[in-house]
Amino acid sequence: MITEKTVLSPANSRNIKMSIIRVTKKFHFEMAHALYNYDGLCKNIHGHTYNLEITLLGEIRKEPGHPKDGMVIDFGNLKKLVKSNIINVFDHSLVINPLFPKEQIESMKNATERLIILDFQPTSENMVVYFAEKLQQVLPSNVSLFSIRLYETATSYAEWFASDNE
């Protein structure tokens, strides 16, 4: 039993059972999109404030004296990875797929400096799969991607779980 008076030495702390931990970081970004050939209002260019939750799975580092001791991943490092691979790419961008007529695509290119043409319909469902693929390529080997949740609105989100995609 650990009490207020108990002091664990580095030798004793190494004997604490290894635990698999989930850590989550939240992000937000603004993005516009249009859904080609959709049968509702989302066929028009419109935007969302997206909220993104990235959850990683890993063991707590047990290296007394190491600057990252006690962490699964430094949240600052996770932030850099997500910002450079997702947020900085998509924030304040217009995202479409290449099925739009060429004239419309050219018009969109002229209207914005940040047009992204993906090879899929830019729905929340497809975006979480894309984000998962991107992040799995750049995550450190000591952690794995557990889940991604992407809120398109306050009440609607798409979710990706690694266990569902093995």
Image: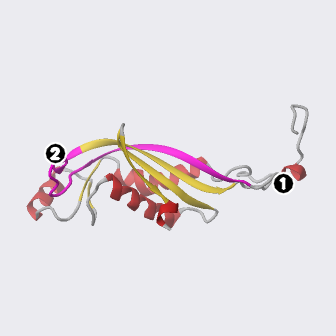
The residue carrying mark 2 is 41
Reply yes or no: does residue 22 show up in magenta.
yes
Question: Which region shows up in magenta?
Answer: 19-46
User: Is 135 placed above or below 67 here?
Assistant: below
In the image, residue 90 above or below residue 119: above
Q: At numbered mark 2, what does the secondary structure look like: helix, strand or loop?
A: helix
Image point 20% across, 65% down: which residue? 98
**Residue 158's spot in the image, x, y percent?**
38, 50
Measure how far apart labels 1 and 2 are at the Cα level.
Answer: 57 Å
The label on residue 14 is 1
Residue 134 within the segment the image draws in magenta: no
Query: N-terminal of the two: label 1 or label 2?
Result: 1
Furthest residue toward left: 103
Colour scheme of this structure image?
secondary structure
Helix, strand or loop at label 1? It is loop
| Residue 110 coordinates in the image, percent (x, y) | 15, 54
The answer to whether residue 76 is left or right of residue 154 is right
Quick one: label 2, few (<14), some, or many (20+) residues within 10 Å? few
Type of the residue with mark 1 = Arg
Of residues 8 and 80, which is closer to you in this image?
Answer: 8
What amino acid is labelled 2 in the image?
Leu
Q: Nearer the viewer, residue 68 or 51?
A: 51
Query: Residue 142: percent from the left, percent from the top?
Result: 64, 63
